[in-house]
Amino acid sequence: MQLKDISFAQRQRLAYIDFCLLFRGHLCRNDLVQRFEVGLSAGTRDFNMYKELAADNLYYDANAKRYFQGNTFHPLFEHDPRKTLTKLANDISDGFDAIGDINFPVEAPSALNVPDIFVVARLVQAILNKQAVNVIYTSLTSGSNDRDMVPHSIIDNGLRWHVRAFDRKSESFRDFVLTRISKVTIKPEPVNTYEEPGEDHQWNRMMTLQLVPHPKNVIFPTAIEMDYHMENGKLALEVRAALVGYLLRRWNVDCTENASLQGGEYQLWLQNQQTLYGAENLTIAPGYTVDETSALDVG
C-alpha cells in the first residue's frame, strides 16, 4: 500500500497523525475524531493504516491511552518548513501542506534562512509538554556550546525565527535564533516555577504603541493612513515588551523624540515614545538611544 493509493480524505487524516506525532509527540484517537468529525471505527482504521505505512513511527501506551512518537520516528509526509512555521504561528495543525494538491497563487519575498524543521518540532514538543531541553547553540560571541533552556514560545520577528526560553546558564529569559540551534534533546526532569512563562515579565508586559505618518518624511499622510488602516490618523497597537524592538525595526518606525530620522524608508513615527521605557531589546529600534532611559529605573 502506498500513499498515492489512499483516498484524499484519509491522506488528510494520516497527515494530521504525522503532524501531531512530529510536533506534539503524541495524540489519541479522540483527537482525530474531533478534528475530522469521523466515527471511532474510522479513527481506528486510520491509525492502523498509519502503522501499516510507518510501523516504527508510533507506539500505543495503554495507561495513557494515546499514541506516542517512536524513537526512530521519520515523517511519513514532507512538511515544508516555511508552510509549517506559518501553520504553527497561526495555530493550524492539520498537516494539509503534506498533501500538496492545492497551489495558491500567492507569493512572498524569498526567505534567506529557514530553520531545521526537526529542531522546531522538538522545541514545540517541549513547549506543549512543559519540558526543558538541552541544545547545541552557536552564538556570534562564544561559538558552539550546549546549554539547557526551558522554551515557551516560537517567534517570527519578520526576518528570523526565534525561540523564547528561560536560559539556565544566564538564569534569565532570552531569545535564541532557531537557525543557530543544531541539536535538541528533551530533558525528563520537571520545570521549576521560576522558569515558567508566567515569570517572563518582558513577555507578559503589554505596551501600547501609537504610530502615525512620519510628520517630516511623508508628504501625503492619507496614503500611510490607508496603508495601515489608521483611525483619526493613528494606529494603536498592543505589543509584548519582549517583541517591541523587532516590530519597530521591521517597519522602520522612527523612535526619535522629534521625528528626526530622514529617508523614504521612515514612513512611520512613534508618537508616544515614553511607552518604551522598560523594554529590553530597544537597541534595534530605529533612532532610540539608551540615553533616553538613563534617568529611569527600568530593572
Image (cartoon, rainbow, N blue to C red):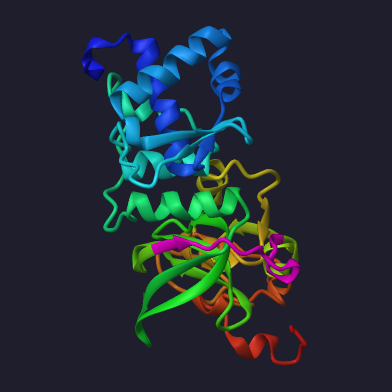
Q: Position of residue 70 (x, y in %)?
A: 40, 42
Q: Residue at x 42, y 35 (%)?
A: 58
Q: Residue at x 67, y 53 (%)?
A: 237
Towards the viewer: 268 or 93: 93
Horizontal side, residue 275 vs residue 51: left or right: right
Q: Which residues are magenta?
A: 184-197
Q: Position of residue 174 (x, y in %)?
A: 56, 72
Towards the viewer: 156 or 125: 125
Magenta-drawn stretch contains 187: yes
Q: Quadrant of residue 47?
A: top left
Task: Name, please, the residue furthest toward the front.
Answer: 62
Q: Residue at x 36, y 17 (%)?
A: 49
Q: Position of residue 266 (x, y in %)?
A: 46, 64
Magenta-drawn stretch contains 163: no
Query: Does 225 appear above or below 281?
Result: above
Q: Is residue 26 visible?
A: yes
Q: Is residue 207 visible?
A: no
Q: Quadrant of the N terminus?
A: top left
Horizontal side, residue 200 vs residue 30: left or right: right
